Image (tube, rainbow, N blue to C red):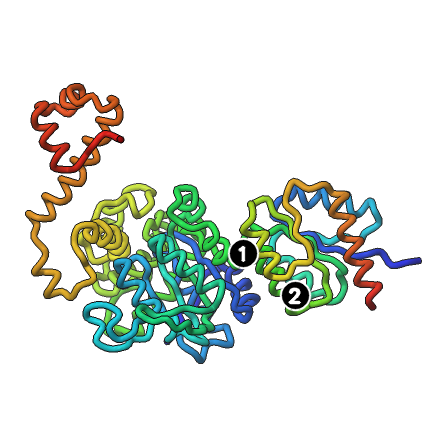
Amino acid sequence: MTTTPLIGVSKSILKIKELIKHVANTCLNVLITGETGVGKEVVAQNLYAESARSSQNFVKINCAALPETLLESELYGYEKGAFTGAHKKRPGKFQTADKGVLFLDEIGDMPMALQSKMLHVLQSGEFSPLGSDQEYKTDVWVIAATNHNLEESMKKKMFREDLFYRLNIIKIDIPPLRKRKEDIPSLIEYYFRLYKLEYPDNKGTRPDSDILAKLCNYSWPGNVRQLQNCIKKQMILNSWEKIFEELTQEHPEIAPPILKENQQNGTQVYINQEFSNARTSIISEFVDLSTSSDKLFEDLSLKKIKKMASDKVEKEVIAFVLEKVGWNRSRASKILKISYKTLLYKMNEFKVHPPA
Amino acid sequence: MVDSNKILIVDDDEDILSTFYEFFNSLGYEVKTAEDGLEALKLLKDKSNFFDCLITDLVMPNISGVGLISIVKKEYPDLKIIAMTGYGDQPGALASEAKADFVFFKPVELFKIENKVSELINHKNDKQ
């Protein structure tokens, strides 16, 4: 694995570099936080590269990209026959990362049930694959990353407090690029050289001082990854003007990337990834995404999903209104603007009943 | 003249640091302070075997108190460590697991901490 260096001259980047040197050989759990695109994986790679584990595996898993059951079997592995389709034994990431590093990306999106299992492994250093009674010892250095504010998630009971404190032994917070503008020139130079080496025939020119000033003043909601994509684009387009045009169209003001709507543009991969995670979790409410694509496509029907989704929302709204009016059905039907009869029918269909 | 006891206090709250500094200083301790775990670790590396006791907060940026305790207990096993936390049971339990010599839950009276510091240091000196 080639390690991307941590580029920057800002105080925060220098401090992170110093911190990496001091903790790389401690094997204490690390939590890396920061917005999408700031370089959390780059920091994880640097920790690994500086550590005595660098000759062992660096295993990465994205906790947001997989549905719960699939994530569990990826992490812990399974025995033959553990579930339908488990034709042979398969090792999990905890096994392949043994003596090395396990990078848990998007840990903030890990479902609660898996969080408690993760806590058990971190406490005991032991795990058992699905369908197995045997406990295996594992010696992994866990580095976790998230763009969520886990303190907030804990308040909302979406992230376990005990898991948070166990991961948060070393905390590395990477500030967004707009808060460390002094890093922008060296990042531009780094990626410019990198792409020039990769594509020596490209004619893209470096920014002059005016353009550089503009680039430094831009808010970079997609952080380093967005800047990196811009440099790549410049190699092909060789027109800073066009690049600025696109930047200002896409992000007219400083706004966190999550607020931006899904865009089909190639430079917006970082946004699409976030949406794709959110998308997967919405879809998995109605369809079992863990099955093979053939089976998945067989089960998938837009009409069916539409009905399931609208039923789900209707049921919640009806229950909500009924609770608010003390189960007075006649009042509820007026509020919902449906007939009394329809309400009774729907209550029956969705099994909405007053508390006994 | 007897050498004064040397302590290192680590907390990301400046007010707490200065209060502790004044208090322990007035009782004749030689006090150094650090605002986070990394600063503390650097001080300890610069002056290895200088300090008698480390008093650390637990929830801090970069190297947390629990992280600091784990590293220090490995590298400087003779150094006595007192942990303080205002974040409920979890960090305190982790500090004990990392082998802190004593854990205080905030708010805590300064005299109580001082009693513990002197008890730990005396105990250590008796053993030597």
Residue most toward the bottom?
A55
The image position of residue A73, as x and y in percent, is 30, 67
Q: Is residue A2 among what the camera can see?
A: no
Indicate the amino acid at tag 1: Asn
The structure residue drawn at horizontal position 58% and vertical position 57%, both measured from the top left corner, is B66
Q: Is residue A10 above or below residue A26?
A: above
Q: Is residue B27 among what the camera can see?
A: yes
The image position of residue A121, as x and y in percent, is 44, 64
The structure residue drawn at horizontal position 49% and vertical position 62%, both measured from the top left corner, is A123
The structure residue drawn at horizontal position 10% and vertical position 43%, both measured from the top left corner, is A307
Nearer to the camera, A205 or A26 = A26
The image position of residue A309, as x and y in percent, is 15, 43
Look at the image and tell me in which quarter the N terminus of chain A lies: bottom left
To which chain does the residue with label 2 belong?
B
Task: Please tell me how crowded label 2 is: few (under 14), some (14-19), or many (20+) other residues with Cα within 10 Å.
Answer: some
Viewer-side label of 2, 1 = 2
What SS does tag 2 mark?
helix
To which chain does the residue with label 1 belong?
B
Nearer to the camera, B93 or A130 = A130
Q: How many marks?
A: 2
- Mark 1, residue position: B62
- Mark 2, residue position: B73
